[in-house]
Image: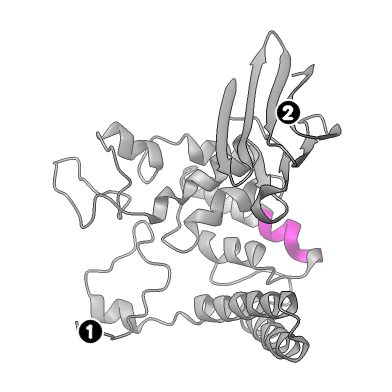
């Protein structure tokens, strides 16, 4: 490989995808991925420019984002609202990057959940979409499916790595074959991005203002879990969310650092605001 050469990998290491003919893999059309990321990246640039007070730059980047999204829709969404390619990864991006109008989001989410079921309740995403797969399901009415994937033990899955003795996250879903043959890196970052689902959905910790001056605690129990706990060392001190289910009661304990404020949303939908200190809430499970 020539240093500096750009290699278009796209949705790298999709389970079951044949990449042994690497030249042919590189040559595949990945316009759905590239156009989606153009729309997303330009949108991020527009928001950054807005925060910096660069109104002209913000408009320029937002125009690019809007046109890229329109191009993606024209090419990959048909008259019935179905999107192509009909893959888990493409549906994840459609939801996460806001590539489809609000009227189509329930249909896209339902199709994503159906693709998971059709794949034996197993994931079918590579490097790019895996971090957003569980959040996309959970945030669009399919929390149960997200937990099924989280606790799936058949390959490809996170727990199949652990069952094979992994103490790190592998680059390939089948990083070590049944016969013990390793594949590429056995200590890789990409699939470890599932930790964001554990923090933001299972434990429910989400920053809503810079430096965690304000944050949300909105745990989403499921999958048979009876407790979860997560902590974050913010610039203001420890942020903590811990919940448990005992005797049909759900208990949430939250630590808010000095000078900070937490917005609480319990599984029942009840909401509370909390200042600095330790707080607890109990409701029927």
Q: Is residue 133 left or right of residue 212?
A: left
Residue placed under numbered mark 2 in the picture: 277
Q: Nearer the viewer, mark 2 or mark 1?
A: 2
**Which residue is drawn at the image coordinates 69% and 8% (left, top)?**
247
Q: Earlier in the sequence, mark 2 or mark 1?
A: 1
Can residue 68 be seen at all in this image of the molecule?
A: yes
Q: Is residue 272 left or right of residue 122?
A: right
**Image coordinates for residue 72, horizontal then vertical, percent:** 63, 81
Tally of numbered discs: 2
Residue 219 highlighted magenta (yes or no): no
Q: Say which element carries label 1.
A: loop
- In the image, residue 211 sits, relative to residue 229, either above or below, namely below
Residue 48 position by quadrant: bottom right
Quote the CA–CA distance across marks 2 and 1.
53 Å
Q: Is residue 93 left or right of residue 192?
A: right
**Which residue is drawn at the image coordinates 40% and 56% (left, top)?**
190
Residue 106 highlighted magenta (yes or no): yes
- Which residue is nearer to you in this view: 213 or 273? 213
Mark carried by residue 3: 1
Q: Are marks 2 and 1 in contact (CB under 8 Å)?
A: no
Q: Quadrant of the C terminus?
A: top right
Q: Which secondary structure class fits the magenta region best?
A: helix
Start and end of the magenta stretch?
Answer: 103-109
- In the image, residue 81 sits, relative to residue 155, either above or below, namely below
**Image coordinates for residue 138, horizontal then vertical, percent:** 65, 45
Can residue 224 be seen at all in this image of the molecule?
A: no
Q: Say which element carries label 2.
A: strand
Mark carried by residue 280: none
Q: Quadrant of the N terminus?
A: bottom left
**Which residue is drawn at the image coordinates 31% and 40% (left, top)?**
161
- Which residue is nearer to you in this view: 283 or 285? 283
Residue 58 position by quadrant: bottom right
């Amino acid at each position: 490989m020539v240093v500096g050469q750009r290699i278009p990998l796209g949705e790298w290491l999709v389970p079951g995808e044949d990449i042994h003919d690497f030249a042919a893999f590189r040559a595949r059309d990945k316009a759905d991925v590239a156009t989606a990321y153009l729309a997303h990246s330009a949108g991020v640039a527009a928001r950054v420019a807005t925060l910096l007070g660069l109104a002209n730059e913000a408009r320029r980047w937002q125009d690019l984002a809007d046109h890229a999204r329109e191009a993606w829709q024209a090419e990959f969404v048909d008259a019935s609202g179905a999107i192509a390619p009909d893959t888990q990864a493409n549906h994840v991006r459609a939801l996460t990057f806001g590539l489809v109008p609000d009227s189509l989001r329930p249909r896209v989410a339902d199709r994503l959940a159906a693709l998971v079921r059709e794949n034996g309740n197993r994931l079918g995403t590579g490097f790019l979409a895996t971090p957003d797969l569980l959040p996309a399901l959970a945030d669009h009415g399919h929390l149960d499916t997200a937990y099924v994937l989280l606790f799936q033990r058949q390959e490809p899955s996170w727990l199949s790595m652990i069952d094979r003795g992994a103490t790190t996250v592998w680059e390939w879903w089948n990083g070590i074959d049944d016969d013990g043959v390793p594949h590429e890196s056995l200590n890789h970052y990409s699939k470890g991005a599932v930790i964001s689902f554990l923090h933001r959905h299972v434990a429910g910790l989400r920053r809503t203002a810079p430096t965690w001056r304000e944050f949300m605690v909105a745990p989403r129990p499921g999958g048979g879990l009876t407790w979860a706990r997560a902590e974050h060392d913010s610039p203001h001190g420890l942020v903590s969310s811990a919940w448990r289910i005992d005797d049909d009661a759900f208990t949430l304990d939250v630590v808010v650092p000095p000078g900070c404020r937490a917005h609480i949303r319990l599984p029942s939908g009840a909401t509370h605001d909390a200042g600095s200190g330790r707080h607890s809430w109990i409701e029927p499970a």
